[in-house]
Amino acid sequence: MNKKTEKEKTINYILLGLIIFLLTVIVFSSIFYLRSSRPMSQAKKEATALAEQYADLKEVDRFYWFTREETYFSLTGKNDKGQNIVVIIPKSGDKIKVLDQTKGLTEKQAKQEIAKAHPEVQFEKVSLGMYKDQPVWEITSKDSENRLNYYLLSFETGEEVKTIKGI
């Protein structure tokens, strides 16, 4: 009977060790996730505050982080008059640009333009920002050979401003 008790104790210690190990992995994974997503949530919070202050943004639909020559944070949503607007904010916080959404492409329309011109690609990411003082949609995609493609579309006309394929 003593031997059975020793086996039970050993099994209990192994199970306890396994449970402690799994809990440790879960806790550290959660901490890593929260810390890695903090810059994005902080940028969104700050950009929203600026957009509320300078563009009367009342309702945020989407947030974009755009980096090309410079970094921009962009928001789409409604202003205090219920109009659909786009607010593009440079990382520096200077020269905030407010655009009428009805005078440009939406994210969905930008994707449709690329899908029409390049039906073979699968979308990876879409961002809105500024390129050479022009508001643009950046669409990142992969082709059938798993190569990256970047398309910059004019926000206003939908024309391709710059294309980089096969990276």
Image: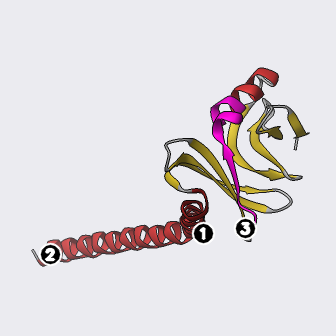
Cα–Cα gap, marks 2 and 1:
53 Å
Q: State which region is magenta.
A: 93-110
**Residue sitting farthest toward the front:** 81
**Residue 81 magenta:** no
Q: Picture quarter containing residue 162?
A: top right
Q: Say which of marks 1 and 3 sits in front.
A: 3
Query: Which residue lies at the image location 72% right of the left edge and 67% below the top edge?
Result: 91
Residue 39, image x, y percentages? 60, 69
The numbered disc on residue 5 is 2
Q: Amino acid at mark 2?
A: Thr
Neighbour class for label 1 at 10 Å: few (<14), some, many (≥20)? few
**Residue 99 magenta:** yes
Cα–Cα gap, marks 3 and 2:
65 Å
Neighbour class for label 3 at 10 Å: few (<14), some, many (≥20)? some
- In the depicted structure, whether residue 76 falls above or below residue 35: above
Residue 43, image x, y percentages? 60, 66
Q: Amino acid at mark 3?
A: Lys
Number of residue marks:
3
* Residue marked by disc 1: 39
**In terms of secondary structure, where does tag 1 sit?**
helix
Of the image marks 1 and 3, the number of the one nearer the N terminus: 1
Residue 89, image x, y percentages? 69, 60
